[in-house]
Image: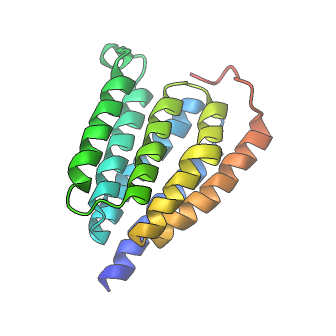
Amino acid sequence: MHAIFAQAVGFAAMTLNIGSYQLKNSRQLVLCRAFGNLIYIAHYLLLGAYSGCTTVAICAVNGLVYGCKGQAWAEWKGWKWLLSAVLVTACLFTWQKDFQPIPSVCTLVSILTNIWVTWSGKGSVIRLGRLLVAGPAWIIYTVSAGSIPGTLAELVGMASAAIGVARYGIRPKEDDI
């Protein structure tokens, strides 16, 4: 029953993440994805996948901070650098016990990509980052963690990102922030 509940929580997070790529406004896209990531924290905790939980938490914080751009504290230019450093440190601490090189490196690449494309402020860059780098790397991690919704979310999320690119193009629009 615990495994079914863990997967159900993951499917709820998956719904938000997939839907985010169909939002035209970049700020809404980032915030919707951040809320999905907050739910994913519970999913990975339930699976006992602490490196995934930690890295998704950093990704969620990144999205929430970026979503608050316009407020003085969120305008600090060092956020992406700070969050990148926290990510690398967190990865080192959560991987000390059971270091598996391929999933561990893929997690780091995926979340670093998410941090950096978010701060571009361009929906097209965010979508392409998910489609070409973050998504494939995260699939490797989710398969190794046993996350059925995580794997499905990346596959469908990559498709959703591709649809978003087709709908909105790859050039920045006036709704990018």
Name the residue furthest front.
101
Q: Nearer the viewer, residue 115 or 13?
A: 115
128 versus 106 height, above or below: above
Q: Quadrant of residue 120?
A: top right
Looking at the rendering, which quadrant does residue 53 occupy?
Answer: bottom left
Residue drawn at x 44%, y 34% as measured from the top left: 115
Residue 61 sits above or below residue 38 on the image: above
Residue 84 drawn at (x, y percent): 35, 32
Q: Percent x, y for residue 101? A: 38, 57
Residue at 27% in and 35% down: 86
At horizontal 30% and vertical 81% (from top left) the residue drawn is: 2
Q: Position of residue 40 (x, y in %)?
A: 38, 58
In the drawing, does residue 45 fall left or right of residue 177? left
User: In this rendering, does residue 11 appear at all?
Assistant: no
Above or below 148: residue 72? above
- Determine which quarter of the picture holds residue 22: top right
Q: Is residue 30 left or right of residue 161?
A: left
Q: How is the image coloured?
A: rainbow
Q: Quadrant of the N terminus?
A: bottom left
Residue located at (79% from left, 42% from top): 166
